[in-house]
Image: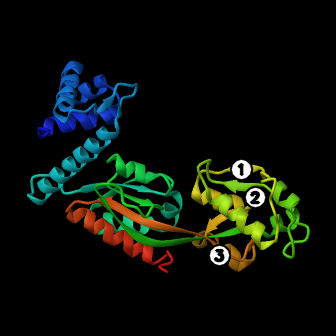
Amino acid sequence: MSRFTAEQLRTFVLLIEYGTFEAAADVLMISPSAVSQRIKAMEQSAGRVLVKRTNPVAPTEIGQIVLRMARQSEYLNSELEQQLGTGAGDRTIAIAVNADSLATWLLDAVAVLAREDRIFCDLRREGEQYSSALLRSGETMAAITSHPESIPGCVVQKLGVARYWVVGSLDFARRCFEDWPRAISLEELNAAPVIEYDRKDVGQDLARSLLLEHFGLRDEAAGQAPSIYVPSSPDYARAVEAGIGWGIVPEQQCAEGLASGELVKLADEPVEFPLYWQRWKISSEVLDRVSDEVFRAARRVLETS
């Protein structure tokens, strides 16, 4: 297989980012036919189809690998220019991050990097179960994820364990569970509103299992409680505090409410999720510096056991 040229790799990246041959052509200031010819030349060189001709276009499975390599090449060229003094002094790095990490600790690292190093983070919010997909495609250079397995071309390290508590407001608990804290019936649990982040969130299933175990309940019918979706980490915590429903809230966001008595734990055991830092497996001073600061911020909040 022949080596792709820098021109071909940039064309490929722009085509995927903008979604059509016409849009990529406008950015490159060439004709759509010229874009198509460059992509065909890459596919002939690779001996594989790299792009699905859909609307918008999408990379094939092998195309995703090429896309990641193309983005890494652009990034490394940019970093080299900066080190040689021929590029801009500011550096930007794209990171996939889950909403709760963003709301509770990651911004501490982002602030230090911007203030002390002029490294600016382009944060892409995505659930920790799904954030590795952005890394796999090369859209981000690093990701906070729940998966310990490294994806091709990346390295992974454990950040720590995020701890959540199953909580509700004191008024909510008294209103919805007649014999709480001594007991909760299955009928009450199935009738009590639950706050969910979005339809991809798996935390509520784990929290429900904890409640069933804590109160000695059997859920053979797998009852479904009414759900209220609040797709914002700070607003999710506010919804629980307001007594709209029960939910699982990061320890950092519910500690004050638990201390004051406005919030109560509905289960004695927390829900815990391990978090991992995945990043491109390349030699990069900027990426190393970002990784160090992310770990420093995580150690102040996450459990390390």
Hey, which residue is sitting farthest right in the picture? Answer: 178
- Looking at the image, which residue is at 21% across and 65% down? 285
Marks 1/3: CA distance?
A: 23 Å
Which mark, by number, is residue 245? Answer: 2
Q: How many numbered badges does the structure rendering display?
A: 3
Which amino acid type is shown beneath numbered disc 1?
A: Ile
- Looking at the image, which residue is at 67% across and 58% down? 205
Which amino acid type is shown beneath numbered disc 2?
A: Gly
Return the residue at label 3: 256
Q: Within 10 Å of the Cα at label 3, are there few (<14), some (14-19), or many (20+) other Cα atoms?
A: few
| Front of the two marks 1 and 3 | 1
- Looking at the image, which residue is at 68% across and 76% down? 269
Left/right of residue 201 with respect to residue 260 in the rendered view? left
| Residue 81 drawn at (x, y percent) | 12, 53
Which mark, by number, is residue 228? Answer: 1
| Residue 68 drawn at (x, y percent) | 28, 46
Which amino acid type is shown beneath numbered disc 3?
A: Glu
89 is higher (above) or lower (below) than 166:
above
- For mark 3, give the secondary structure: helix
User: Which color scheme does this rendered protein use?
Assistant: rainbow
Which mark, by number, is residue 273? Answer: none
Left/right of residue 100 with respect to residue 19 in the rendered view? right
